[in-house]
Image (cartoon, rainbow, N blue to C red):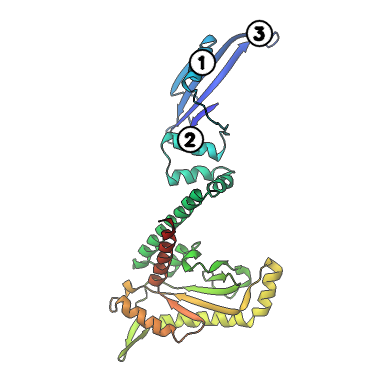
Amino acid sequence: MTIKNGPRVFKRASISVYGSPTSGEIRKEELRLESFARKAGTNDFDFENPKDRWFCENGEIEKLAAFLAGAFSTAGRYRLVDAASASATMLSLLDSGDLDPGSLGRALAEHEDLAAVVSALTASASGLNAVEAAVIARRRATIVELKSLCVDPATTETDMQHALDGHTWIFGGQYIGIAHRRNLTMLDEYDIPLVEASGALHVIELKGPKIKDLVKKYRSHSIVGNEVHQAVGQLMNYLKQLDQQGAAMEQAFRNEHGVEYDMSRLCGTVVIGHSRHVPEFTRKQIDQVIRTFNSHLTRVQVLTYEDLLDRAELALRFEESAFE
């Protein structure tokens, strides 16, 4: 029987019976308790060389059982837990004092009944709040990492595309997923075709955070730079192509994937630049120039990475207020 399967030690108990297999006579019973440390440099326990060993036999076992029965006589309800289950893993981590979010996640991921544990956690209001708070904390850490990446002058467009992979929640809660790319062959690999709850598509075009001419002086005014115009033009061409193939693509999505997309109300967002890399202008000045530029667009908007991440952070603050 496994008593403990911890991060540093494995403890087990075993009972051996010695006697005659023919007559059934029992000559000796032995209770053995052993603990094993991990092999140096590996994750395996050294079962051939016990770290500690203790045993008792025959009548000594009965005396020990009587002692334990008297020492732990508290009335209550008890449950038998499978030693190979995720529940047993959680109990082991609690018992060892090594319970932290990282080790808990790694331990539970090794078990097939993880879904049952998560279901149990979210079945109560307190458990659901704990899970939601953990998700918000993880997302906040992601935003911190992305903000740090944006201000690094060595960060490229590809770096941001990879960093945002799997984090579509950053673009807002109105999106429920990503459209199947197979039918959107005109889009680049890293464009993100988001799907709204209504079925409408919203294409995200990601550019790099370091854009020196994000805005520039032109005569007595400030305007967006050439790279912004080029990115908007690129996205407009995507939308034009999608418009031209809209009816056929709706049918393809319906037949191949069983989903209903509305290709009649396409729009998109260009995410580009960061004020940190445009020292000639303040963030307020940059925001005003881009806001003026956006006011003349209908189906496309331009956002800086700064604005995108600040909006996501504000949304998380709003979610966090529910736990206060």
Q: Earlier in the sequence, mark 3 or mark 1?
A: 3
Instruction: Determine whether, in the image, residue 256 is placed left or right of residue 4.
Output: right
Q: Mark 1 or 2, which is nearer the eye?
A: 1
SS label for mark 2: helix
Placement of 85 over or under 53, stated as above or below: below
Relative to 231, is 178 above or below? above
- Closer to viewer: mark 3 or mark 1: 1
For badge 2, the amino acid type reads: Ser
Q: CA distance from mark 3 to mark 1?
A: 24 Å
**In this picture, residue 156 sits left or right of residue 180:** left
- Residue 22: x percent and y percent? 70, 10
Depicted 238 relative to depicted 181: above or below: below
- Of residues 303 and 43, which is closer to you in this image? 303
Q: Alpha carbon of mark 1 to alpha carbon of mark 2: how far?
A: 26 Å
The answer to which image quadrant residue 242 occupies is bottom right
N-terminal of the pair, mark 1 or mark 2, is 1
Circle 1: element type: helix
Circle 3 sits on which residue? 25
The residue at which mark 1 appears reads as 66
Query: Viewer-proximal residue, 277 or 201?
Result: 201
Callout 3–callout 1 Cβ contact below 8 Å: no
- Quarter holding the N terminus? top right
The residue carrying pointer 1 sits among few (fewer than 14), some (14 to 19) or many (20 or more) residues within 10 Å by Cα, namely few
- Residue denoted by label 2: 92
Residue 80: name its quadrant: top right
| Towards the viewer: 18 or 172 | 172
Residue 213 visible to the viewer: no
Looking at marks 3 and 2 on the same chain, the residue that comes earlier in the sequence is marked by 3
Question: Which secondary structure, mark 3?
Answer: loop
